[in-house]
């Protein structure tokens, strides 16, 4: 895993890379300017060769993706939690929401009287949560110094796709989660078909927008998500697909209508657009 993400290799000349999840070989499926995406021939994970940048997650980012659609995203997250509770009973105790963003999960936790702590590297996100009196810690999980087996539930909503080294990250979560604890991961699902559509749109030099690149580095499917959980010391209780919030519906206007049709087109051709994994620690 170390040595590929963000290394100084000339990715422009590289057509094949070893998969950072399963080690099998992968081929390049999309490129645009300095950005490239490779797909593993075995587990199907799609990964990019660029570094994560915390500068992407400024006030504008959170305002656009999370603060403006706060209530809609909250309803959507509640729907996911109801699905999760069909597979596993969420234990009482300490919850940690890694990459809590605008605090949508923390808000739900407060309503349910769960003891939840949020964590985020973005100062804009942390400031926003604090204004809402939500319990949030600034910084990165790797530097947090949490005690071993401190948490009963750890959640990662739309976080794992943004990490340079998700295996090490999940291993740190394994350390801080209790033996009886539950790990919840939700991540966008961008199938190869979406990358093929993006290839046709490369002439616009904006095709990366539909792939959420450069913010997103890993694009998991059900198989690769199971694989990374197993590699990190978790058993998967269930993996299911779900439909993400159509953000284009949030505003109305001619441009938004075009985007709405684009969204529907992509939906018909690419299917469900998120995948959720519920995991328990391997004992
Ligand atoms: Zn792989």
Image (tube, rainbow, N blue to C red):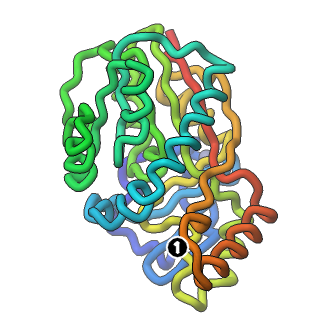
Disc count in the image? Answer: 1
Q: Is residue 166 left or right of residue 252?
A: left
Name the quadrant containing residue 117. top left
Q: Is residue 237 left or right of residue 154?
A: right
Front in this rendered view, residue 223 or 256: 256
Front in this rendered view, residue 122 or 1: 122
- The percent coordinates of residue 7 (x first, y second) are 34, 62
Position above or below: 205 against 92: below
Residue at disc 1, CB closer than 8 Å to ligand 1 = no
Q: Residue at x 37, y 26 (%)?
A: 110
Q: Which residue is drawn at 48% across and 67% down?
A: 213
> Can residue 27 be seen in this snapshot?
yes
- The percent coordinates of residue 268 (x first, y second) are 80, 63
Q: Which residue is drawn at 36% across and 62% down?
A: 63
- The percent coordinates of residue 119 (x first, y second) are 28, 38
- The percent coordinates of residue 51 (x first, y second) are 35, 61
Provide the residue designation for mark 1.
209
> Can residue 16 be seen in this snapshot?
no
């Amino acid at each position: 895993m170390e040595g590929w993400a963000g290394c100084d290799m000339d990715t422009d000349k590289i057509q094949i890379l070893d998969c950072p999840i399963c080690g099998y070989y992968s081929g390049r499926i999309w490129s645009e300017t300095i950005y490239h995406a490779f797909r593993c021939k075995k587990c199907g994970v799609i990964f990019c060769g660029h570094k994560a940048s915390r500068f992407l997650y400024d006030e504008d980012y959170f305002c656009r993706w999370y603060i403006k659609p706060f209530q809609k995203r909250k309803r959507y997250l509640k729907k996911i939690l109801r699905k999760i509770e069909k597979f596993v009973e969420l234990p009482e105790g300490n919850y940690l929401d890694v990459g809590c963003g605008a605090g949508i999960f923390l808000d739900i936790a407060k309503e349910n009287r769960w003891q939840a702590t949020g964590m985020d590297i973005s100062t804009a996100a942390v400031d926003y949560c604090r204004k809402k009196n939500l319990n949030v810690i600034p910084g990165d999980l790797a530097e947090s110094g949490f005690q071993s087996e401190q948490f009963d539930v750890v959640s990662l909503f739309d976080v794992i796709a943004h990490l340079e080294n998700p295996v090490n990250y999940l291993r740190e979560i394994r350390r801080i989660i209790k033996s009886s604890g539950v790990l919840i991961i939700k991540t966008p699902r961008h199938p190869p078909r979406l990358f093929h559509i993006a290839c046709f749109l490369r002439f616009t030099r904006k095709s990366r927008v539909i792939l959420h690149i450069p913010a997103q580095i890993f694009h998991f499917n059900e198989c690769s998500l199971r694989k990374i959980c197993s590699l990190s010391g978790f058993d998967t209780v269930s993996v299911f697909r779900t439909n993400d919030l159509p953000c284009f519906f949030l505003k109305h206007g001619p441009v938004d209508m075009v985007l709405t049709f684009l969204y529907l087109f992509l939906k018909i051709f690419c299917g469900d657009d998120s995948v959720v994994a519920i995991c328990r620690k391997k004992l």
